[in-house]
Image (tube, helix red, strand yellow):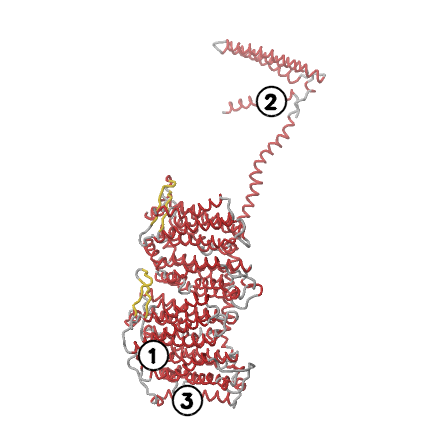
Amino acid sequence: MSGEVVYLVFALPILSFIIILAFLRPLFKGRPKVSSYLGIALTGISFVLSLLLLLGVYSGKDLAASPLLWLNLGNVDIKFGAIIDGLVAIMLVVVTFISLLVQIYSVGYMRGDPAYHRYFALVSLFTGSMVGLVMASNLFWLFAFWELVGLCSYLLIGFWFDRPAAANAAKKAFIVTRVGDFGLLGAVILLFTQTGTLDIGSLHILATSGALAGSVLSWATIGILMGAMGKSAQFPLHVWLPDAMEGPTPVSALIHAATMVAAGVFLIARMYPLFEYSPNLKIVAIVGGFTAIFAATMALVMNDIKKVLAYSTISQLGYMFLGLGMGGVSVGIFHLFNHAFFKALLFLGAGSVGHATNTFDMRQMGGLGKKMPWTFACFVIASLSLAGIYPLSGFWSKDEIISSASEEPVLFYMALVTVFFTAFYMFRVVFMTFSGSYRGEKEHLHESHKEMVIPMVILAVLSVFSGFFNLNGGFAHLLGETDVETMGIFEVLSHPAAIISLLVALLGIFLAYAVYKKQWLSAAGLTRVFYPFYTLFSKKYWIDTFYEDILVRRFLVNGVFEFFSLFDRYVIDGLVNGAAKAATGVFVFFNYFDHYVVDGLVNGIGGAAKSVGKSLRHLETGQLQLYGAFIVLGIVVIVMTIFIVEVLV
Amino acid sequence: MLGHYLILSAILFSIGLFGALSRRNGVVILMSIELMLNAANLALVSFSKYLVSQPVSGQAFVLFILVVAAAEVTVALAIVMEIYRSHQTIDVTNVDLMKW
Amino acid sequence: MTNGLLSVAIFLPLVGAIIIALLPASPKLIKNLASFFALVALGIGLFLFFNFESAGGLQFETRVPWIPQIGAYYHIGLDGLNLHLFLLTLILGFLVTLISRDINERVKEHFVWLLVLETSILGVFSSLDLLLFYVFWEIEVIPMYFLISIWGSGRKHYSAIKYVIYTLFGSVFMLVGILSLSISSGTFDVTEIAAMDSSLLSQVLPLSTTFLCLLIGFAVKLPVFPLHTWLPDAHTDAPTSASVMLAGALIKMGGYGMIRVCLGLLPEMAEKYAPILLSLAVVNVVYGAAVTLRQTDIKRLIAYSSISHMGFVLLGIFALGEVSLVGAELQMFSHGMITGLLFAITGIIIHNTHEREISKFGGLAHQMPLASTIFIIGGIGAMGVPTTSGFISEFLTFFGAFSAGARIYTIISLLGILLAAGYILWLIQRVFFGPLRPELASSPDIKPLEVFYCAVFIFFIFLIGLYPTFLVDIIRPAVGLLIG
């Protein structure tokens, strides 16, 4: 097997997108399933190929894909190519696998939707773009696909575009992530200018050899971090992700839980040597640690099941950042890997519940455990995994992160508190949704279709076992780390950090059990006691309000932009129109001038002659002798004049 | 000697001018004008005699003037006649056809 | 043989215009004839394009004395600086004959003016003689005036007059600059003047005055803040065909003039005034985008977005880097296609819904799915999303400008793409998304012919986006020669 296979992994979903849009959508209007079958088939092949690549990399084969010259710019050029290493192979498997399962699930979930073709076309496009992002060997292409997955995310969040909330959320998602992309694009341009290359491998070498250092490296990593924070919804650019839940739930599972939002984590891992040699790795950890606890607090009080999961995703992405910042690539990416499975499963479970009850509001649920046993079981497994309960997958990766954070006490305690919150809010969801009695109005609740259940079961199995991947340090080896601490499956329980985090998680679950299952403590009472916090969390710290109402609406759109707009209309255009008016005024003046002064002068000379004549004509008496007298007088005057002049001169 | 002739000529001219400006009778005015013409003639022949080597030129002028004066007087008298017919008078102060 | 073909391509639309004007023909025949002439011209243009040697400098040249007493020549030719703009004009020239097929009022005049307009823009792009350039430049005003004031809408007379006066205001300065250059050098020929030592060019006016005079002429066209206010009015009130031509090809004359004349003939001055012009570029980008966000008329919004996008062109030009100039040239082509598409589809939407206030729209994606998809594709291009031409041209502009040293300007200009996402997505949300408004429920979707010409735009947007080498290889050698 040659490395060029990776291009096929990329091309197949794109091909699926093109075929669906160009042929299936117009030709198979009445049989929408054709699209889903095509998408599943091609994504399936992509998945198998990715798996082969992963095995190849794992077995130490030297796989490479020769790049293609795409654009020559004289001294510099841009190549289209792929990196094949452990990181890429793992990401490819995760992306194609989750995409495959989500598409299978969607066959049931999206049944009967009028835009079925469009849905599968976009999911295919997303899968292809995400593969492109992951494999890109050149930062230019990484950025290009980065934007494309953003576009797919936009189109899929706004999939049901007739809902104003969905349209709004889609726009918000794109614009907020673009704020981060502003930094990423700046970093790409800075790196390209300074090094003349965007090849990721070359950049690694430049960074490790010290050729790329100092303020350039520092600024570049800050830009990259900005991009990652936007995509991975880290504070303060986290606001788009909860709103993005307006999209179809399978999309939330694929894009907004497992893959695209993890692209930020992937990006930092991809550019890790740059961060390692810059002073900014600590910032990554701080951003992650803060976001983890910050988002978890909001997850505590949400009543919409998908919103809880969204804040949970933000919080877990924060963990990954923390892991990257404190531990290293494998620590962060391992959590990404495990999180992809259990979080996708949680979303699919939420989708299954929502599909049955027609709502995502947990206050309208309850008692679904009996009606939907498969969903219930899968959801509980995923929740336990997310909470970090031994020996499920979440435990392993979270434990690594927490123990690596122990060097920084503040971050360590923040992470621990987050573990508590995570366990609490997840089991709050579990108890509110599945236990007790049903509070909604829909009748005949039943388990979802089998095409929805099967993917959930597969993911549930993985949520249990994916954590064992790193037991012997296999995962870390795959990511090129050599001296790895290996932990046996039981030895780990002697590790103090592991014990503490496990106990904290159990405490969280117990509290949720006490409040929402047994009602030893009343939820309303807790709310009352922690009223200021409750308000703060449920109002999302007023950050959304601040951004949307104050920053964007009041300050920018109705403030600065309105000022510019008025400036344009009244000052600049006013000047233009004023100049035109002034010119017109001048012309009017010229007109008057011409009429009265120039013409007046001409007429005036005539008129003067006329009036002088009028008065002088009275001399014309008709008296002959008077005329004679004048003549004589004239002659006398002339003679006298001549005489005087002659005498004087 | 030229001076005497010129003085005479000036006296004649002044008499004629006075008559032309002061008399009311059209015919008398004509006669006065003739007097002025003749004063001029006298001056011309005097100049011709005393100042010019070829005296003919001055005399030729005079002869011309005589002829022209005759013709002029004829016309003038005809006008006077016509005025008399239409106005029943030859008093020029009563004739102001050229008034504004 | 190919050299003569260039003249044929330029004047064929004019010939078509004369034939249409003289022929007593039915409206249908007139429309077909106009499309035919424009199509043949486009065919010739494509033939020239594919016969162009990318590293061969000026090609297809014709140079015959025109007014030899003052050193004016009929000198035309194509190189990497104008070939793609020439092609762009031919493509748009053909497409607008299709776009205006639903014109039913004074049909003959409309198509005559469209064809005259095409010839004049082609002339501007291919002239290598300043006097010829100026003549074509001025001719262009006439058809545009009539197109706006007869077939326009809204305050069309005001807009048409404003357009003419603005253009003439700029032209006066430009003429002064041209005369100063040509009297000093004794020739109007661009290639000859370019070869001269610049100290010879300051005999009439100081070089900086000449430069600024020329620049004002081009800045009005591009347009550059604060000489931009004709643009929204003219674009908004013009008929669709004229808007497409105006936004697509005409304003590129400004950018092209800056490159060919300001930069090509007076490079030292360009360097001297670059900081001021770069600042104006940033103002154009940010201010233009900010004002765009406040527009309430759909066509006016797109018109304002052009100001922001032309700021990128200005940034690319006066960063004076090789890559930045390539970016600017590419951006001109790309913007021609993207904004051309947006104006075309907006024209269809306004025509079918009889509505143009953004606040009166809503949910159109249900009623006009095809039109909405096309609009969204155009919007994606305007936002500079990868795979569209907007992305690669903006990327090259930014990268080129940054690496040429205009760092702060570039960073601030990056805000432009952020704001672009804001105004495009907000527009899409308000017009196409949300529940359908009942008033719009009877609006028909677009017709096959309309789909066809939109598809041509889309084809070029993605062609350049996916395979920029196609144009970059032509532009780059010419830019290299220019800044040498």
Q: Is residue A515 above or below residue B80?
A: below
- Number of numbered discs: 3
Q: Would residue C379 be visible to someone looking at this image?
A: yes
The three-letter amino acid code for the residue at tag 2 is Leu
Q: Secondary structure at mark 1?
A: helix
On whether disc 3 and disc 2 are found on a single subunit, the reply is yes
C171 or A146, which lies in front?
A146
Q: Is residue A458 above or below residue A600?
A: below
Q: In 3D space, how far apart are the residues under numbered discs 1 and 3 (Cα atoms)? A: 25 Å
The answer to the question of whether label 2 and label 1 lie on touching residues, with beta carbons closer than 8 A, is: no
Position of the C terminus of chain C, as image quadrant, is bottom left
**Left or right: residue B16 compared with residue A50:** right
- The residue pinned by badge 3 equals A503
Few, some or many residues within 10 Å of mark 2 (<14, 14–19, 20+): few
The three-letter amino acid code for the residue at tag 3 is Leu
- The residue pinned by badge 1 equals A330
Q: Is residue C141 above or below residue A464?
A: above
Q: In 3D space, how far apart are the residues under numbered discs 3 and 2 (Cα atoms)? A: 142 Å
C268 or A622, which lies in front?
C268
Q: Which chain hosts label 1?
A: A
Few, some or many residues within 10 Å of mark 1 (<14, 14–19, 20+): many
In this rendering, the label closer to the viewer, 3 or 2: 3
**Left or right: residue A336 compared with residue A438:** left
Q: Which mark is residue A72?
A: none
Q: Which chain hosts label 2?
A: A
The three-letter amino acid code for the residue at tag 1 is Ser
On whether disc 1 and disc 3 are found on a single subunit, the reply is yes
C180 or A194, which lies in front?
A194
The answer to the question of whether label 1 and label 3 lie on touching residues, with beta carbons closer than 8 A, is: no
